[in-house]
Amino acid sequence: MSRRGQGGSGLLRTALNSGRTRSGNGRSSQQHTPRPSQSVTSSRGPSVAGSRDVSDDELADDTASIASDDTWLLDAEDSDEAGGVSDNWEEELEEALEALDDKRIATREKGLQTAIRLMSHVYMGDELEGRRVTLLDALRRAARRTKGDQERELALRAIGLWFVNFGTESEGEEEFASTSDLLQALATDVSVSSAVRAGALGTLGMANFVSGADYRAAAELSRFMHDKVLLGALDEHTIDVARQTFETIGLLLTVVMDSDARLGDELFEEMFDTHMRGLTVDSVDVRVAAARNFALAHEALSSEHANDATEYAFERQDELVGVLEMLKNESSKRQGKRGTVTQRAAVRDVLNTIEEGEAPKLKLLVHGHPVVFDDWSRIQRLQAFRGLLGGGLLV
């Protein structure tokens, strides 16, 4: 199947529900119809621990799952911030791009915010085909500026949205290659803020997922993130960077595991100790991100070994299960009630996958139609697309 002619909704449907193709090159073809009247309550890289108050009943609930976690709820309320895209969105985008060359940083940031809103709520791949390179160049220039972290964060998110809109075209692989060096440099630059580094990591993973050459490129990028970013982030206790790296590695693993389970097994074995270490970090977000990758890998490798005489198990599965059981039963005094509920729900789902072969069943209502995510690969992809698109996921 060709990358050309792929609509925004088709890309999401392929990515979230049917998986990236074996070659890494194909996507199904669908057209997009804008519907800006619904939104999702989310921001990029949300904390899974959330912030609302938690009751004692929730704390004692031994059946909670990520499928019942309100961080996944979709909000069907009208939202001017999330939607509100007018018919003259091309003119708005043109003005936003002009603002990116303004001397005032506040004007440039406002231009990036407008570009993000438009690119997350309108599929532009067809209408702006002739200007795709000009747009990407402007966003890369913004990401290179060093006067403000906020400007860089916005530019990085906009680059991720650019790949969702334009990255499935035939030139997408070349444009990913030309952008990857910038993103990798920011991801490994300890002199910039952790938010900028995390933004670069998230965009790097999404750009590879959409436009990478094949699953081998995803595996190579996973190793880069593990060796050059994750180990250092854990040493320095850089929580945002560690969380985002685990999450992005999880997204890339969905590509590798779908295409070559043996390579996926080898890759995850290399990272096993680091994921175990992630379970001990004093951050619920990092622990949950690491734990979900264990579930993803176990589910994929169990499927690959479905015809074996014995059930698949990690070499150090007993040790892993022991640590997960400790996390599931950890006192709320350490993480607080909300963090404890989030950790227990996520760890319970991971244990159910490893011990019982059962994945959580996440059901979202999108435009009145239920969409079910019942395996870890789809859930990981949903998390990545939702974190980037925000309210645009419903569109």
Image: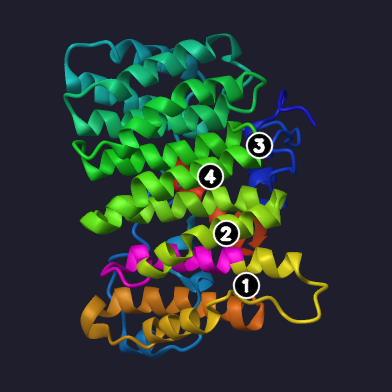
Label 3 neighbourhood size at 10 Å, few (<14), some (14-19), many (20+)?
Answer: many
- Which type of secondary structure does the marked residue at label 3 adopt? loop
Q: Mark 4 or 2, which is nearer the eye?
A: 2
Residue 230 drawn at (x, y percent): 36, 52
Residue 66 drawn at (x, y percent): 49, 71
As displayed, is residue 255 above or below residue 118? below
Residues at circles 1 and 3 in contact by the CB criterion of under 8 Å: no
- Badge 4 is on which residue? 393
Q: Quadrant of residue 237?
A: bottom left
- Badge 3 is on which residue? 214
Q: Residue at x 65, y 53 (%)?
A: 263
- Residue 294 falls within the magenta-colored stretch: yes
Instruction: Find the distance from the CA under tag 1 to the CA under tag 3.
Output: 27 Å
Q: Mark 2 or 3, which is nearer the eye?
A: 3
- Which type of secondary structure does the marked residue at label 2 adopt? helix
- Badge 2 is on which residue? 379
Label 4 neighbourhood size at 10 Å, few (<14), some (14-19), many (20+)?
Answer: many
Q: What kind of colouring is applied to the model shown? A: rainbow
Magenta range is 278-297
Compare marks 4 and 1 and give the one earlier in the sequence.
1
Q: Residue at x 71, y 33 (%)?
A: 25
What secondary structure prevails in the magenta region? helix
Identify residue type, mark 3: Asp
Identify residue type, mark 1: Ala
Q: Quadrant of residue 267?
A: bottom right
Identify residue type, mark 4: Leu
- Number of marks drawn: 4
Compare marks 2 and 1 and give the one earlier in the sequence.
1
Q: Residue at x 65, y 22 (%)?
A: 169
Instruction: Find the distance from the CA under tag 2 to the CA under tag 3.
Output: 21 Å
